[in-house]
Image (spheres, helix red, strand yellow):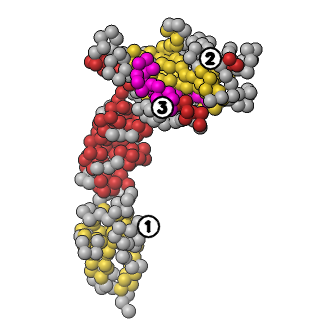
Amino acid sequence: MARMSWMVVASLCVALAGTVAYGFPVVFTVDSAPNVYGSPDWAPWWDDTRADIVSGGVDCLRTGTFPGTRYIIPVDETVYSFADLGKRLHWIYWVPGQDVTSLDGLLEVKWSVDWFGTAWTDSGGWILDDPASGWSQPQSWEDYAGGTIGSVGFAWWAAYPSNDPAALQGDLELYWQAQTYALGEVRFRESTSDPWSVVGIELTLVPRDVYALVEEHGVPLDQAFALASLPGRAAERVLDLIDEFGLPLEHVLALIAEHGRAAVLHAAAFARSPHELHALLLGYRFGGEAGGAGAATTLGIEPSYAEGDTMSLAFALLDPLDGEAIADALVTASLCSYDEEGTPTIHAFAVIPFDAESGRYALDIDLAGLPVGSYDALVCAGASACERVTFQIVPEG
C-alpha cells in the first residue's frame, strides 16, 4: 500500500506543535543514535540529547552522516551484533509541563518505511502502513526536567545470523536498492474525546549514485543531487571536465543551468583552458584596462580620423566570469565600408598581437589610401566575441 501524505510534516527539523490548539507543546526531532541495545555510547548520547532538547532543541541528525539535514544513508539506520553495533534512528519527543501519567491515552508514536515501493510499519510485527496503523503509546518514556521525554526508534538488523562484515556490506547495498525514506511521527490530543494532531519528520535515503559522488569525489550533497540528475554518463564527463580545468563543481553546474549540458560538454571538447571554455559559452569581454571588469569600450578607436592617420587599437580581453585578463586568444581586426546597397568592402584584415608589457592586445593600422567616408572596425576574439565600432575618415585639416 502506498504511503499516504495525510500527516502534518514539520517544516523545521525541531518541530514545535500543538501550542495553539492544545494546552501543551510537543517538541519533536530526530537523530542517528548509537545502538541502544549494547553500545556504550548510547547512555552519553541520550544524556546529552535530552539535556540539549530541554535547553533549546537540537539540529536534525546532528550525529548522522549529514548533520542538520533530513538525509540519511543505510549506516545511519542499521544495527548488527559485532564491532560498534551500528546505529538506530530515534525520533525524540519532549512534552514540557506534562508527566507520563498525565499523558496516558493522549500521546502515541509510530515509524514507517518503504521497501521496494510498499510502505510498512510496526504493530508487534511488520504490517502494511496506513494512517490508522502502527500507532502505540510509548513504553519507555520518562519524566524528565519538568516534562516527559522519549523516542521511537527504527533500524534494520543486518548481517544476521552470520555476523560477517561482508554480509553487512551486502545488506547495506540491499537497503539502498529497496528503501527511499523513513518516517517518524507523534500524535497527541488534549483529551481522549478530542481528535489527534499529528507531526512527522520524514528522512530521505540518499541514492547510492548520489552518495558515491559525495564519498568518492568530495562533492557537496546538494550539488551531488544536481550532478547525478544528468542523464547517461554526463555526470562522469562533467567530473572529467572539472578535473581537466580545475573548476569548482558549483561553477560547472551553473554553466550547465544557463547554457545546457550539451553546450557545456561540447565547448569543453574544444577548449584548451577554463578561459576558452567560458569564451565558447559566453564570449570574451573587451575592456579598456587589463584585468578591468567594466563595460565594453571603444577599443581605443577614435570617432574620426583625418586622411592618412594611423588607428591605434589597444584593449584588454577579459574572462567573462572572473574578469581575468586573457593573453592567449586569437584576436583579429578588419576594416570595411558599405556601398549604398549595403554590400561590404574589406579594406584591411590583421591578427592583433598581445603586448605582455601593457597587458593589452595592441595594433597600429595605417589608414593611408582610404577615402573620406564611414567605416566599421570589427574586432573578434574567436567566433563568439566580436565588437563593431563605426568611425569616420574626414578630410585632412
Tell me the quarter of the image containing the C terminus.
bottom left
Instruction: Examine the structure image and report whether residue 184 is included in the region drawn in magenta.
Output: no
Counting residues from the N terminus, which is met first, the one under dot 2 or under dot 1? 2
Residue bearing mark 2 = 108
Q: Nearer the viewer, mark 2 or mark 1?
A: 2
Residue bearing mark 3 = 61
Q: How crowded is mark 2: few (under 14 residues within 10 Å), some or many (20 or more)?
A: many
Q: Residues within 10 Å of mark 3 (few under 14, many from 20)?
A: many
Residue bearing mark 1 = 295
Q: In which quarter of the image is residue 340?
A: bottom left
Q: Distance of mark 2 from mark 1, alpha carbons?
A: 64 Å
Q: Residue at x 39, y 15 (%)?
A: 157
Q: Foreground residue, 199 or 89? A: 89
Q: Quadrant of residue 198?
A: top right
Horizontal placement of 191 versus 152: left or right?
A: right
Q: How crowded is mark 1: few (under 14 residues within 10 Å), some or many (20 or more)?
A: few
Instruction: Examine the structure image and report whether residue 33 is included in the region drawn in magenta.
Output: yes
Residue 11 in view here: no
- What SS does tag 3 mark? loop
Q: Label 2 is placed on what type of residue?
A: Glu
Q: Residue at x 34, y 11 (%)?
A: 160
Q: Label 3 is placed on what type of residue?
A: Leu
Could you tell me residue 304's position as x and y percent? 40, 81
Q: Distance of mark 3 from mark 2, alpha carbons?
A: 22 Å
Could you tell me residue 106's position as x and y percent? 68, 17
- What SS does tag 2 mark? strand
Counting residues from the N terminus, which is met first, the one under dot 3 or under dot 2? 3
**Which residues lie in the magenta part?**
26-48
Horizontal placement of 59 versus 304: left or right?
A: right
